[in-house]
Image (cartoon, rainbow, N blue to C red):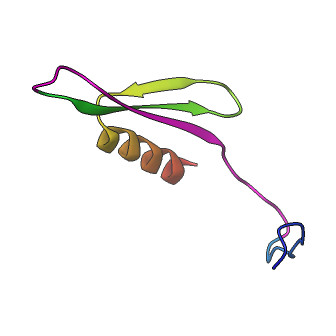
Amino acid sequence: MDINETTERPFTTYDGRVYVLRLWYEGPEHAPAWRASVREGTTGARRYFLSVDECLEHLYTELLRR
């Protein structure tokens, strides 16, 4: 399929969410860790997490909540 082709969607309304996920590696050499932040696309609200697992748990909770 060509990237410019469009396909029909099986539903009539589209309810989506946009999040910007940022991951980085930080910390002292003896205990480095992955950190994460999420910015909600429509409001710009940003949250920071000490682990990727915490971030994913937050996103999962957000998706179930709405």
**Measured along the vertical axis of the image, is residue 63 above or below residue 47?**
below
Give the total number of marks visible in the rendering: 0
Instruction: Estimate the x, y position of residue 58 in percent, counting from the top left.
Output: 41, 41
Task: Specify whether 41 is left or right of 39.
Answer: right
- As for residue 24 lying within the magenta part, the answer is yes
Q: Nearer the viewer, residue 29 or 13?
A: 29
- Where's the N terminus, which quadrant? bottom right
Residue 57, compared with residue 22, is above or below; it is below
Residue 30 shown left or right of residue 43 in the figure: left
> Start and end of the magenta stretch?
12-30
Q: Write the residue at 43% across / 47% down.
A: 61
Does the segment drawn in magenta span residue 6? Answer: no
Q: Vertical placement of 57 versus 25: above or below? A: below
The answer to which of 10 and 33 lies nearer the viewer is: 33
Question: Which residue is at 89% across, 66% downward?
Answer: 4
Looking at the picture, tell me which residue is in the foreground, 29 or 20. 29
Residue 38: give x, y in percent of width and height: 51, 33
Q: Quadrant of residue 49?
A: top left
In the image, residue 50 lies at what x, y percent? 29, 28
State the residue at coordinates (39%, 46%).
56
Residue shown at 46% from the left, 45% from the top: 59
Q: Quadrant of residue 20?
A: top right
